[in-house]
Image (cartoon, rainbow, N blue to C red):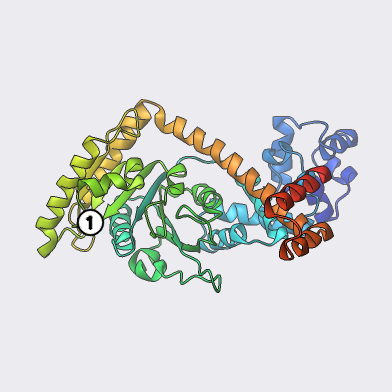
Amino acid sequence: MKLKDYLNLSNITSREFSKKINVNEISISRYLNESRFPNKKILKKIFKLTNGLVTSDDFLYKDKNYEDLTIEDKRDIDILVEDIRNCKIRALAKSITMVESTLAKDQKRTDYLLTKLKQQNKSLRIGVTGVPGVGKSTFIESLGLKLIQENLKVAVLAVDPSSKISGGSILGDKTRMDRLSTNKNAFVRPSPSGGQLGGVAKKTRESISCLESAKFDIIFIETMGVGQAETEVYNMVDIFLVLLLPAGGDELQGIKKGIIELADLIIVNKSDSVMRSVASSTLIDYQNALSIIKNNRPDYAPKVLKCSSLKLNGLNDIWNEIKKFCKIRKKSENFFVNRQQQNQDWLWNLTKQKMLDHFENEVKCATFSKSLKKKIITNKINVAEASNLLLTSFIKKI
C-alpha cells in the first residue's frame, strides 16, 4: 500500500506521521510525492508503524497507472497479496478469478496485483498435453500425489474448452482429480479456454505468477487436449510432456504430429494389462520417429517412456527423468535463458492483447465503424478496403 493511501485511510496527517517516526514534515511530503526514497532506517520505522502495510516495494514504482483504483481497492489487493504469499487457498482462488475476469476494473486490479506480487521464478512448470481420453488428469493426479509424498507442494492449472455457442465450460478436471484437489498441499484450478487457441487460457501466465508467489514447488499446466496444435503451453513451461495412447500410430504418423517436435518427454500412458505389449510397440515406434527429428533442445535429447497412471507403474522413471532434465538444463544455464525468453514473449503477447482489446472497444463505440458495416453489408465497399480505413482511423486517434 502506498504511504499516502495509508495516511488517508487511517485519517493521519503528514505532520502527525512525521512526529511518530521522528522525521521532518518536508521529508514526509517528498516521500508522498515520490521525489525522495526513504533510507533503510526510516523504511523499518514506516513498516513497523503501518503494521507491514507499507513496505519498501511501495516506494519503488509510480502509482499513476492505478489512479482509477480506490484506496479500498488497493487495501484489499494488498491484503490479498499477503494471503497469497501465505498460500491461503481462498485468496489464490479469488486472485485467479480476478485475473480471468474480462471486466475493465478487474483488469486494472490484476495489473496492480501482479505489480505487487512480482516474479518469483522458483517453481518448476510442467506442461502436459495429449488427445482427449489419453489420461492427462489421472496422470497428473498420480504423479502429483507422489510428489506430495516427497514433501513438495503441487498446483494444477487445468484448461477446459469453452463452448462456441454458449461460451460456457464444463470445468470437470477438479472432479477427476478428487484425491489431489482435496489434499492440503495441493491446489487444482480448472479454467475455461475462452476461445484461446494453443490449448491454454488467455490468462494462464498471470495465474502461474499467482501460484509461484504462493511458493508451490511444482505447477502442472494441463491443456484442453483437442488436437496437434497445442503448442502455446510450450512457451510457458520448463519441461513439456506429451501423453500418447498405445497403438496411436506408427513412426510416420508420429513425425506428422508437429507437437512431437516440441516434446521433451513422450509418455505412452495406459501401459497396463492387455495394452502392455501394444504400449511397448508404440514406444519403439516413437523412438524411431525421434531418431530422424532434430532435437529441439541443444543440451537434451527427448526420451520416450511408458507408464500406467492407474496402476502407478513407471511414475518413478518419469520423475527421475524430469529431475535429470532440470539438472542438465540448469548446468548449461539454458533453463534460465528459457525463462528469460518466456518473459519477453509474455511482454509482447500481453501488449498485443491489450492493444487488441483497446482497438475492439474503440471500434464498438465508433460511429465510423458502424457506417462501414452498412457499406460492407450492401457491398458498397470491399472488406480489405474497409479494414484499412478502420485501422487508419484508429491510428490517428492514438
Which residue is at a point 73% across and 29% down the rendered structure image?
A: 39
Relative depth, front residue between 22 and 93: 93
Question: Please, which residue is most extreme toward the top here?
Answer: 332
Q: Could you tell me if residue 358 is visible in this image?
A: no
Relative depth, front residue between 8 and 395: 395
Image location (x, y in percent) of residue 113: 64, 51
Assess disc 1: are there few (<14), some (14-19) or many (≥20) residues with their C-alpha within 10 Å of its C-alpha.
some
- Residue 12 lies, with reference to residue 310, above or below; the image says above
Which residue is at a point 72% across and 38% down the rendered structure image?
A: 61
User: The C terminus is located in which quarter?
Assistant: top right
Number of residue marks: 1
- Residue 289 lies, with reference to residue 134, above or below; the image says above
Please tell me whether mark 1 sits on a helix, a strand or a loop.
loop
Q: Which residue is mark 1?
A: 248
The amino acid type of the residue labelled 1 equals Gly
- Residue 398 lies, with reference to residue 220, above or below; the image says above
Image location (x, y in percent) of residue 254: 26, 47
Image location (x, y in percent) of residue 333: 40, 27
Question: Please, which residue is most extreme toward the bottom here?
Answer: 166
Q: Could you tell me if residue 330 is visible in this image?
A: yes
Relative depth, front residue between 172 and 383: 383
Relative depth, front residue between 32 and 394: 394
Q: Is residue 79 left or right of residue 238?
A: right
Which residue is at a point 42% across and 70% down the rendered structure image?
A: 172
- Residue 269 lies, with reference to residue 292, above or below; the image says below
